[in-house]
Amino acid sequence: MARYASIAAVNSSSLFSSFAITCLRDFLDTKPRASNVDAWAAQQPDEPGRSEAIRRLVELGLTVRTKAKQLSPALAARAKELAAKAIDQMIDSAAPPEERAQRRRRLTKGPLEFREDRVDLPKAKEK
């Protein structure tokens, strides 16, 4: 822990750097994580130090793009069914049936302004 304290003392000029040091210290306090980082660094051609290895791994993690996975139709239907059941339990039973249907539809579809950002729905065709 003494080595982390000296690093924090040098870089404590900004709140962000002390926060980053704290996060890094917490991350490396578990031996499996530190040993995994060291093992990855040993496999690299230039064998970077731990801090350089962590920087490269973070950079790799930030640049990798993964496609959003689409649920199978059966799973999507099941999720919709479970959501409808949960919503039915929360909706006011004294409300008229049309109002309950409208509330359920609004909750399952989401607000209009967010629908275009959802990755689980197909994009609407432009007119």
Image (cartoon, rainbow, N blue to C red):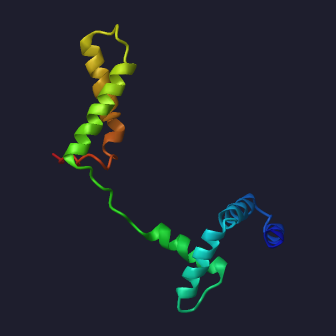
* Residue 12 as seen in the image, left or right of residue 100: right
Q: Residue furthest bottom?
A: 45
| Closer-to-camera residue (93/119) | 93
Q: Quadrant of the N terminus?
A: bottom right
| Closer-to-camera residue (45/7) | 45
Q: Residue furthest top?
A: 94
Give percent across and percent down for residue 35: 62, 75
* Residue 32 as seen in the image, left or right of residue 81: right
Please, is residue 20 above or below residue 107 in the view? below
Q: Quadrant of the C terminus?
A: top left
Q: Residue at x 55, y 77 (%)?
A: 56
Q: Residue furthest left?
A: 127
| Closer-to-camera residue (93/106) | 93
Give percent across and percent down for residue 76: 25, 42
Give percent across and percent down for residue 7: 79, 71
Q: Quadrant of residue 50?
A: bottom right
Q: Residue at x 31, y 26 (%)?
A: 85
Give percent across and percent down for residue 65: 39, 66
| Closer-to-camera residue (117/126) | 117
* Residue 26 as seen in the image, left or right of residue 56: right
